[in-house]
Image (cartoon, rainbow, N blue to C red):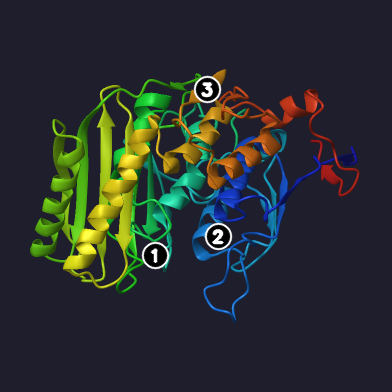
Amino acid sequence: MAPRPRPKPRPLALDGRTLEGGGQLLRLAVSLSALTSLPIDITSIRANRAPRRASQPAGGLKAAHLAAVEWLARASRAETTGMEKGSLELEFRPLQRGEFVRETKKKKKNDDGGGEGAGVWRDVYGGSRVVRRETEIRLDSPGSVCLILQAMLPYLLFHAPDTAGSSGDSAGAGPGTTGGVPLRVVINGGTNVSKSPSIEYIDQVLIPMLVEKVGIPPITSQIIKRGWSSGRADVGAVRFDLTALPSKSKLSEFRFMDRGDVTRMHVSILASDSAARNRLKNLVIERLLARHRDVEIVFPIEEDTKNGARLYLLIVAETSNGYRLGRDCLWERKSNASMLETVANTVTKQLEEELQRGGCVDEYMQDQLVVFQALAEGRSVVDSGKDMYATLHTRTARWVAEQLLGLTFDERGTCGGCGFEVGENFLARKKTEGEVEDSIEGFESLEIA
């Protein structure tokens, strides 16, 4: 039978200058596009970001953005245009689920032995069984490991598990599936990078909150080597171990309410010598006890950075109801006694301001919960505290989620999530609801056996 035409869904156009107009819009949009198979066109990528030098163009894809986009493109078998460093426009067309089923009938396994991972996964066997799936992202510069993880995480957690493991025997499974098999993700880049969350913040705030309060499966991390943007630029690596949500499951709504009392302070200090670390430690203790006399203070990390231009401080407040709020500072110049005092004063003051608002999250955690609110079933609530406005990053994340998933956040930052079912054909759902139109342009051929 001759090939018959089938229309493609019309891509959603996103202006990269919207609100924050930086990398977050790109990361979340591509992440949700890969997960849902909804095609997108992004223009003016990071156009609100000023260049470091007057001779350089504003915005565009940087190496770390490109690494995340490339991984998601391979995992979702997306057709792309503009996927190159410095590009201001990106067309991202994930393989639709029905198309994937037809592909797997033709070819059960990828050439690299990675099952249905479109080349991103390597299977590790124990006897005849797959015991782990591994993937690695490499950067030759200290781009943020944590921001790359941020882009990948919704796809890793919510994509369809393959009940046949990774053998490719499940015809209904989607591209890049992982099943209940443990996943290991190694990301090379920067662990402590300016204007990005540190690996300490991810370990001590983000992951505990997602696991204990949102309800995602456990995630562990291990620093293989630190990577810094300060001092001499140094590329590091982090290993993350996790498991996807079960097939056909939905993330339940969550409520971040009633923070409780602060019971413990976690203080992480990275400085170039023991004298600097001890001085900063004493300064922090003095300032914390002045405001929280009965609180326990622990020091999970005291580490030598081996470079006088590398100084990092993170303080995390843990509460009686299990919430964690953090503030930090990465000092990127040569440190001295006065600078140590400045860092201690700045971080303790900012953390105290967060605590005075009475909310369950700090301003950096606020925007990272948006995608989980949007994908969950039911109405998730996040109390950010009195007089706490939605940050620009949070408003941007909400806007992206609204555009792709067709939901609405109210003025309090709550929304009725889309109830994404792990493994569902979300594109088919949106077509049924009349929220996705087919394009009358660019028909493709479908071979009928």
Q: Which residue is mark 1?
A: 142
Residue occupying image coordinates x 51% and y 64%: 63
Image location of residue 121, percent across then percent down:
46, 46
**Foreground residue among 267 and 11:** 267
Q: Is residue 245 left or right of residue 16?
A: left
**Foreground residue among 63 and 333:** 333
Q: Which SS class for mark 3? A: strand
Residue 37 shows in the view: yes
Q: Is residue 222 left or right of residue 78?
A: left
Image location of residue 42, percent across then percent down:
70, 53
Specify which label sits upstream in the sequence, 1 or 3. 1
Image location of residue 423, percent across then percent down:
58, 27
Residue occupying image coordinates x 20% and y 53%: 269
Q: Which mark is residue 14?
A: none
Q: Is residue 348 left or right of residue 93?
A: left
Dot 3 amino acid type? Ser
Q: How many marks?
A: 3
Q: Which residue is mark 2?
A: 66
Image location of residue 45, percent across then percent down:
65, 59
Q: Which residue is mark 3?
A: 380
Is the residue under label 1 in contact with that under label 2 (CB below 8 Å)? Answer: no
Q: Is residue 309 above or below residue 129?
A: below
- Measure the alpha-carbon separation of dots 2 and 1: 13 Å
- Measure the alpha-carbon separation of dots 3 and 2: 32 Å
Residue 248 shows in the view: no
- Measure the alpha-carbon separation of dots 1 and 3: 35 Å
Q: Which SS class for mark 2? A: helix
